[in-house]
Amino acid sequence: MSTVTVTPGIDIRRADDRYKTRIGWLDSKHSFSFGRHHDSRNTHHGLLLVNNDDIVTPGMGFDTHPHQDMEIITWVLRGSLVHQDSEGHSGVIYPGLAQRMSAGKGILHSEKNDSWRLEGAKHQDPVHFVQMWVVPDETRIAPGYEQLELDDSLLRGRLATVASGMPDHDAAIRIKNKYAALHVARLEPGDSVELPEAPFLHLFVPRGSVTLEGAGALAEGDAVRFTATGGQRVTAIDPAEILVWEMHATIAA
């Protein structure tokens, strides 16, 4: 990681410009290079390497697969997702539940939309979630898992710190990177929040639409990459949810 000086800038990335993976059970949109979609000019922003916007059909999902040396945060917008891993952790992730998996020196896990089994056959709903990966401070650490439910009132009309490794942040869950934090807000029309200031910010709109001060409207699926700036206001046009990564370092070249 590096704390290099960067030139101020705002880079808007529109939803339709994302890489897409569509198979029978999965509709996935990737903000950065992912899987077979590789572009050396679009591998990360700050410490964020993956921002996948996924919809999975009932009864389907990602079979057991490995990860290593990555902090993986999953945020569900609609439906429920079942997690199981090789360290014996299991749980159901649903809207308002923050979840972090530290892959560390190596972990196997699966993620499935088991709404048909959990809630009964009449509730066969897709699950919509955003999965985000940031690099850890140290490699080869012990794998770990954490989840915590947040009261809806904590997210309404304000940026709530959902995951952080920064020592001065009071976050719902901790991640193993002292330079990064994820903030989430649920906004009603007219609600407005101010972005933090940091060398690197990543704003993603997974639900609804908003306006960004000085830049105009952002639709569902749009993202903005900020460098050496912040403090702009984000205002909801209709009911919306935003995910904001605050990062004080980047991946060394």
Image (cartoon, rainbow, N blue to C red):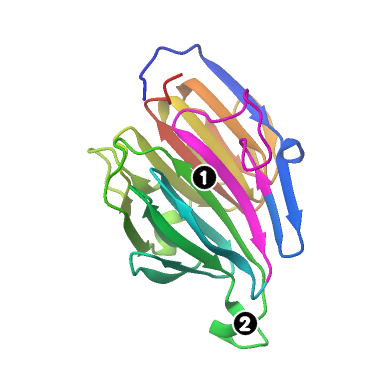
From the viewer's perspective, is residue 106 above or below residue 80? Answer: above
> Alpha-carbon distance for marks 1 and 2?
28 Å
Residue 52 at what x, y percent from top left? 60, 47
Check residue 109 in the rendering and tell me which mark sits there, or answer none: none
**Is 17 included in the stretch rendered in magenta?**
no
User: Badge 2, how many Cα within 10 Å: few under 14, some, many 20+?
Assistant: some
The residue indicated by pointer 2 is 116
The magenta stretch is 29-57
Q: Position of residue 248 (x, y in %)?
A: 37, 27
Label annotation for residue 243: 1
* Residue depth check, mark 1 versus mark 2: number of the one nearer the observer: 2
Q: The N terminus appears in which quarter of the rendering? A: top left
The verdict on residue 39 being magenta is yes
Horizontal side of 12 relative to 63 (left or right) equals: right
Residue 223 x/y as whole percent: 62, 36
Task: Count every numbered label the image shows and give the total.
Answer: 2
Local packing at callout 1 (Cα closer than 10 Å; few below 14, some 14-19, many 20+) is many
In the image, residue 7 above or below residue 232: above
Where residue 169 sits, quadrant-wise, is top left
